[in-house]
Image: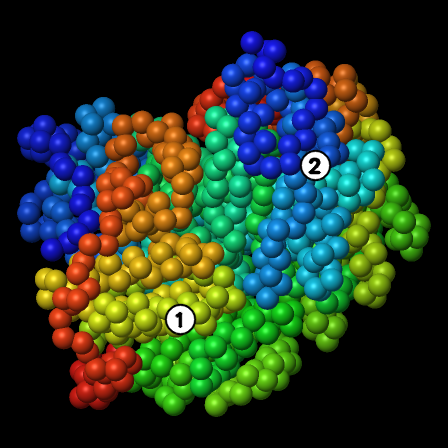
Amino acid sequence: MTAHMRLGFHAPETDEDLSQIVLEAAESGTPLEIMGKGTKRELGHAVRAGAVVSTEAMSGITLYEPTELVMVAKTGTPLSAIEAALAENDQELACEPVDLAPVMGYAAGEGTIGGLVATNISGSRRILKGAVRDHVLGIKAVNGRGEVIKSGGRVMKNVTGYDLARTLAGSWGTLAIMSEVALKVLPVQRESRTLVFFGLTDQAAVEALCIAMGTPYEVSGTLHLHASVAARLSDEGLAEQGAAVTLIRVENFPASARYRTSRLRQALLAYGPELELDPVRSKALWDAVRSLQMFQGGGNPLWRVSTVPSRAARFVGNLARKIDVKAAYDWSGGLIWIETPSLTDAGAVEIRRQLAEFGGHATLIRSDAETRGATDVFQPLEPPHDILAAKLKHAFDPLGLFNPGRLYRDR
Amino acid sequence: MSTLPLPDPDRAVLARRNDVVKQLKKLAPQAVLIADVEGRRTFEADALAAYRRLPLAVVLPVSTEEVSAILRFCYENHVKVVPRGAGTSLCGGATPLEDAIVLCLSRMNKVLEIDAANRVARVEAGITNIAITQAAASQGFFYAPDPSSQIACTVGGNIATNSGGAHCLKYGVTVNNLLGVRMVMVGGEIIDFGGHHLDSPNYDFLPLIAGSEGQLGVVTEASVRLLAAPEGARPVLIGFDSAKAAASCVAAIIASGIVPVAIEFMDRPAIHVCEHFVPAGYPLDAEAALIVEVEGSEDEIEYLLEKIEDIARDYDPISMRRSQSDEESAAIWKGRKAAFGAIGQISDYMCMDGVIPLSALPQALEAISLICRKYRFDVANIFHAGDGNLHPLILYDANDPGQLERVELCGAEILKLCVELGGCLTGEHGVGIEKRELMYEQFTDEDIDQQVRIKEELDPSWLLNSGKVFPILGRDALKMTIDLTNLGAAPPGPGEDLETTAEAVLVEGEERP
């Protein structure tokens, strides 16, 4: 039967073509690897597929209404094209998506908007403005039965039926192949200013970041870098301190940004704010953070850990007693990027043992293929959640055609 | 007579009523169980009062464990369950069925934890929306979603319909502020989704649960994001001589890079009714008014309001009044939030909830006015303009048996218009029974089948809130068959009539709040 399906690479240009490919795959029992430009292909388990379906030929912005804060684009549209179109109207993706491409060895901006939604990896501003998924308004997709389905729409509010659009965000191409997404966009943040602290312990830094988040000043970035991580920043003034660096960003109209950083400085006097970065330097710094500059270049394993901020420092502290870790805390401690030495399991056992105590979950972002093959890249699920995940998968993709093995090796 | 059918009751279940009641009492000894007719009658409808059914029994549990025991029993005995919070649904989301028990969460109303360091509140699902902010205010926090019914509606209900509110332009709707839920699945299994952290491992069930109208499980606890309260907030009230000018002004404000915390729109009839209900200085000579609110320090507020007023000047406002005090701001918002109640004082009404792209606003308002004239109803428009979520209130007389059917058809036509303009049937109220048969206007068979497959994976016997959300009559059932030539006497010109009524009723001093 497999003769019905051309193996190899498919790049359909329309929903109908995409649907046809899925129907052929269903008929011939051919599993499909789903991707955009493939910049995150080395993230997650290798997919056991007979053919590859890329959205790259479904590209282009289909609707952009700046006064309605909405953009609709085909999922194969490069992120860089989306951001360029938004910038022309002084708008942006408010979740400040992390560009993983450089740490994965690709050029910045090369990934697609579909890949961003499918992986839901939000950046520093997530703490103020919400995650990628929070800005998804609607989707068009092809499910595992080859049916073209839509959910949501292009308006800001919509509770008509179940929200399949946001449910597909972060599903890593395992439920349906998205062909179009509608996103809420926001005006650019006018001016960025950053308070800098040097040499704080992890515990003190997270405390300071949480205090900042508890103020009314709409803090949009809260980061704490171990000295070894800060040393890799291109901002020499920060890199050359030889100390841990803690950053608190405010973005607003110029007068507001100045007022708010001064208030924050007062509120955090006890932590000894040492510098205030001007808008140009502040923006350059956070752009570097957005593409994880501090973890580029090396090949050591890189983890992304989500936990409760107040427990973050103790979690890293305990972990550091077992393995040599270099950490960057984002989201006031709720998100931790952890670089580990190249151990056989990339530190998976120890990280997850600690997380079992502190609560949270860990994803292995970068590692060599051998480690990846032998380690649970995504957080293993407890049995009840595993059963529910299987049910959701079955509702969308009953034959298990899409990205088999990508998230979990047995599914 | 109501026009939307509810599923026929299962006679075998009705025959077992006494046994069901007896078993429930045994299973959930701490729960309040209401089995007498008078008691059950209190729960026979939600805020869509035209639809009533006497449920088998009403049970008000006090714990997740009791909810679990009740659901397991219902699952094993094939008894349907209608989850309910405060019953404020305007679309029949909590309308009971005769062969169902109503599972009312209103006694589960505790704040379990205010975690200030991580800015999370963990609450039971039956707590009212406003009670979260009240519990967190002393530490400088608030819970952002603020539906107009927030003093009554529950967080569980907010999750079921993914509620928004006036301030969601800036802060997002329920799903954007929800970090975790504890949910009891139909078989009684208790599952925690999410937690106090900001993203989910593997599939994210929270957006699926938010807005699923109680059909996938019963949420008993929620962890929600707390935000630091702003230093201050102040609205400006701007009157225009046309809806088009007001709509263009909204677009211009957003294009300027300012996202106010709220932009509310009121048309002439709504302005008049609200002003008579809560005198707040609304511009009585305007065709449309905007309440635009910004937040920040005094200086920031001044700066932003000046910018907004500058923009508004390009659209020839006939009045522009910046609130000068907290009392004045409170009065302006009180009028807006009491609007539905105020209109309810002078007439029965049907509240629509369609959403349109903002650019279609003038066109939509004109078409709504024409549709209502065709069906011979007055209409008042009050809505969240920043996000295009319309709330036309169609005024009718519920005591006139012919009018309910006519008003439903009128409403359906308005919602179809919203879909045609690129919007959707419901922005924050949910589908319930009210919009169930209109789902085909927005969705294909494949779209609906995909949703149904999820329902069937999680609730294969359709025990949870069945008869809601999905069409039960089939694609062509709700054809407009009404004879438009026989709609009764035409009312006088639109709008004026309503204002006169408002003045007549309210100036006499009846029921001021």
Which residue carries the number 2 mark? A56
Which residue carries the number 1 mark? B365
Q: Is residue B472 visible?
A: yes
Q: Is residue B108 above or below residue A27?
A: below
Q: Is residue B475 above or below residue A3?
A: below
Q: Is residue A75 left or right of residue B18?
A: right
Please state the horizontal and vertical placement of residue B173, each as a whole percent of the image.
47, 55
Tags 1 and 2 touching, CB below 8 Å: no
Looking at the rendered structure, the kind of residue marked 1 is Leu
Q: How is the image coloured?
A: rainbow
Q: Is the residue at mark 1 from the same chain as the one at mark 2?
A: no
Please state the horizontal and vertical placement of residue B298, each as a whole percent of the image.
60, 80
Q: Residue visible at 77% across and 64% down?
A: A193
Q: Is residue A306 above or below residue B94?
A: above
**Which part of the image, by quadrant, shows the N terminus of chain B?**
bottom left
Q: Is residue A103 above or below residue B423?
A: above
Residue extending farthest front: B485
Q: The numbered mark 1 sits on a residue in which chain? A: B
Q: Helix, strand or loop at disc 2?
A: loop
Of residues A247 and B420, the one drawn nearer to the viewer in this rendering:
B420
Q: Residue visible at 40% across and 59% down?
A: B418
